[in-house]
């Protein structure tokens, strides 16, 4: 059971995409096919019951190493700003993906600031509103975090998602110089995932207490909280707290 | 802690900045918002907005619940507009699964969303006016909000946390005669709006307290990542209902009110006009509601294929977005992220309060219309 969960998710949706994309609307074409993938298994009564049970335990057995990020179907060209980004900054777009109507570009973490400047400044992109900055944790992967920027252009009314993969301690430049709106959003990503943003004007925890240990949204962080991990020796914890308070008073 | 630098006013007297802590238990901070103000006399020099007192880890919890159970958790974010949260979440999952939602369900969603917008704006208007000192409006606005809660109670049995949506459609059809009551409510509300306006719009005290307070230009508002009425108050024509229509908004006729100056007064005017536009949408949707099924073809076991998506809707506070990643194998989302409009709008508070008086801080918090349940999640 352990080997099959790692394999199918990546190639399955794109392969469902390509043959189905015969009519004008590829997303609609992909939909029934992809959705049919699961009920097809349910249609045969015998193998159906063990399947969901196995699926429930699958994430614990073999953690997925990333979203499938299917490439766009052949008859759907990427939006123009992707081409102009590639022309202006060669080597910044490592992958273009299209899924249920959303365009995603994957960029190297080291060049995120260049990409951000271009996407905000270039007239055909003009992504002036930084809707969201968030992250996804894939602990099984070497570069475990996907930092995701959801961008919107109030001029062209289009959207794009930019993704950068970073390892646990790998620095990634803050995009606050380009979009001041990213300030709190990046603070939250730092707070919840421990992504190492550099050049951030105010990198503090935002939702958790300042003296919190660990990063709650990571997959290896227990749902119930650190529990005994933190309270193993409550005296230590109190001492740490007291020291912090004294430092504050001074 | 913050250092308190000396301010040089003249040759003779030097004063120190005063650090004033406001909240988290302060009646005007609408919940548990804490603002650390640095004051020069009565003037705010800088502010540090501290949040997180209501953090319940809804994102983390949701990643450990199945797809249907999460609807219940979304109620607890923006708890004065729970139905909007439900709709946003269900639509995101439907987008991920590419489910077709029946037209009747989409119409009912539109009606619920707009009723919810009016209820949320009623709460905003009442508390905002009370912060500034107008007690009467609070009583008026809550009286009308009660009517909406009654409508919701009749539809789904709850008055605050509705759990009123299902993935693929609605939990139940509208109760008989409900649409008549909605139209009756619209009729009542029309008159009440004039009452609010009579109390506030030309009220001298209201004008003095809100005009020119917290001015944001369009470029500043976009830079700060604002959305919803605070963004539109600055004159940016951005409304998810128009730009990326969801539910049945593509079939509705309505206008997006815009401000020009971008001060507290215009944010107030924008929201008041939104009341009227919401009533217009509710009337259209209620009169044109089609017959038909209320749930689409939803598989028994909800398990979206592997992939990720971001879907936004226009909540009463602004752009409410959900970013959801499914690994295609488990019955819970791999990553569940909410882009809360209140969180992003509250970020603008620091810039808004600079240079204003302490008394204006409560007006500005009110004009952003934040709900801390959503800020902290």
Image (cartoon, coloured by chain):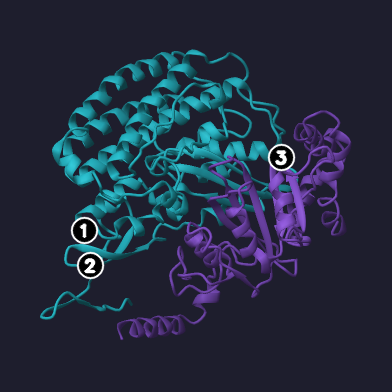
Above or below, A105 relative to A40: below
A221, B142: nearer the viewer: B142
**Residue under the image location 36 percent in, 85 percent down:** A247
Is residue A50 rendered to the left or right of residue B38?
A: right
**Contact (Cβ within 8 Å) of mark 2 with mark 1:** yes
Instruction: Indicate the position of residue B324 as horizontal and vertical percent values.
Output: 63, 48
Nearer to us of marks 3 and 2 is 2
In depth, the one of B67 and A45 nearer the eye is B67
Q: Is residue B175 visible?
A: no
Q: Left or right: where does residue A29 sit relative to residue B319?
A: right
SS type, badge 3? loop
Q: Which residue is mark 1?
A: B358
Viewer-closest of A231 and A77: A77
B25 lies left or right of A24 = left
Residue drawn at the location 76% of the way across and 62% of the way down: A91
Of all chains, the one bearing label 2 is: B
* Residue lying at the far left of the rendered structure: B12
Chain shaded purple: A
Q: Is the residue A222 above or below the residue B352 in the image?
A: below
Judge left or right: residue A63 versus residue B288. right
Q: Colour of chain B?
A: cyan
What is the chain identity of the residue bearing mark 3? A
Residue A17 quadrant: top right
Q: Which residue is mark 2?
A: B39
The residue beneath circle 3 is A100
Secondary element at tag 1: helix
Q: CA distance from mark 3 to mark 2?
A: 50 Å
Q: Residue at x 26, y 32 (%)?
A: B141
Task: Locate residue B251: give its quadrant.
Answer: top right
Image mark for residue B101: none
Q: Nearer the viewer, residue A246 or A233?
A: A246
The quarter of the image holding the N terminus of chain B is bottom left
């Amino acid at each position: 059971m352990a080997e099959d969960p790692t394999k199918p998710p990546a190639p399955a949706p794109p392969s469902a995409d390509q043959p189905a994309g015969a009519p004008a609307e590829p997303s609609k074409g992909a939909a029934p096919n992809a959705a049919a993938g699961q009920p097809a298994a349910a249609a045969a009564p015998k193998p159906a019951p063990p399947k969901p049970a196995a699926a429930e335990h699958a994430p614990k057995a073999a953690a997925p190493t990333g979203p499938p990020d299917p490439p766009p179907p052949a008859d759907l060209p990427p939006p123009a700003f992707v081409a102009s980004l590639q022309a202006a900054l060669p080597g910044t777009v490592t992958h273009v993906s299209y899924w249920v109507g959303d365009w995603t570009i994957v960029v190297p973490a080291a060049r995120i600031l260049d990409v951000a400047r271009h996407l905000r400044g270039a007239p055909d992109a003009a992504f002036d509103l930084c809707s969201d900055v968030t992250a996804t944790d894939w602990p099984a992967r070497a570069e475990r975090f996907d930092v995701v920027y959801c961008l919107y252009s109030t001029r062209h009314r289009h959207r794009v998602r930019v993704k950068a993969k970073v390892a646990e301690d790998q620095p990634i430049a803050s995009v606050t110089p380009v979009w001041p709106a990213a300030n709190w959003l990046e603070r939250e990503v730092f707070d919840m995932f421990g992504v190492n943003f550099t050049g951030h004007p105010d990198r503090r925890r935002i939702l958790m207490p300042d003296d919190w240990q660990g990063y709650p949204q990571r997959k290896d962080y227990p749902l119930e909280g650190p529990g005994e991990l933190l309270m193993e020796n409550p005296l230590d914890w109190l001492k740490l707290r007291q020291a912090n308070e004294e430092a504050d008073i001074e | 802690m913050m250092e308190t630098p000396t301010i040089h006013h003249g040759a003779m007297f030097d004063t120190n900045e005063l650090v004033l802590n406001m909240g988290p238990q302060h009646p005007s901070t609408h919940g548990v918002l804490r603002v650390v103000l640095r004051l020069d006399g009565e003037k705010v020099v800088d502010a540090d907005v501290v949040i997180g007192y209501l953090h319940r880890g809804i994102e983390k919890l949701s990643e450990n619940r199945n797809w249907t159970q999460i609807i219940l958790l979304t109620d607890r974010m923006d708890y004065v507009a729970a139905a909007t949260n439900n709709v946003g979440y269900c639509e995101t999952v439907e987008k991920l699964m590419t489910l077709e939602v029946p037209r009747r369900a989409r119409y009912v969603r539109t009606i619920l969303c707009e009723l919810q917008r009016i209820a949320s704006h009623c709460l905003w208007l009442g508390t905002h006016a009370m912060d500034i000192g107008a007690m009467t409006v609070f009583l008026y606005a809550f009286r009308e909000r009660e009517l909406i809660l009654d409508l919701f109670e009749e539809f789904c049995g709850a008055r605050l946390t509705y759990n009123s949506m299902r993935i693929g459609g609605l939990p139940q059809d509208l109760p008989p005669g409900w649409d008549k009551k909605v139209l009756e409510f619209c009729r009542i509300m029309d008159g009440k709006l004039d009452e609010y306006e009579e109390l506030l719009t030309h009220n001298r005290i209201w004008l003095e307290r809100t005009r020119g307070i917290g001015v944001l230009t369009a470029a500043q508002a976009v830079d700060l990542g604002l959305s919803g009425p605070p963004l539109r108050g600055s004159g940016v024509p951005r409304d998810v209902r128009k730009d990326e229509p969801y539910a049945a908004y593509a079939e509705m006729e309505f206008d997006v009110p815009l401000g020009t100056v971008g001060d507290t007064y215009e944010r107030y005017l924008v929201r008041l006009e939104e009341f009227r536009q919401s009533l217009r949408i509710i009337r259209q949707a209620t009169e044109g509601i089609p017959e038909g099924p209320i749930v689409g073809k939803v598989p028994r076991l909800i398990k979206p294929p592997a992939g990720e998506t971001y879907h936004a809707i226009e909540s009463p506070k602004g752009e409410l977005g959900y970013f959801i990643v499914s690994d295609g194998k488990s019955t819970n989302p791999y990553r569940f992220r909410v882009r809360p409009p209140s969180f992003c709008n509250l970020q603008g508070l620091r810039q808004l309060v600079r240079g204003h008086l302490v008394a204006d801080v409560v007006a500005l918090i009110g004009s952003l219309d934040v709900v801390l349940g959503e800020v902290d999640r």
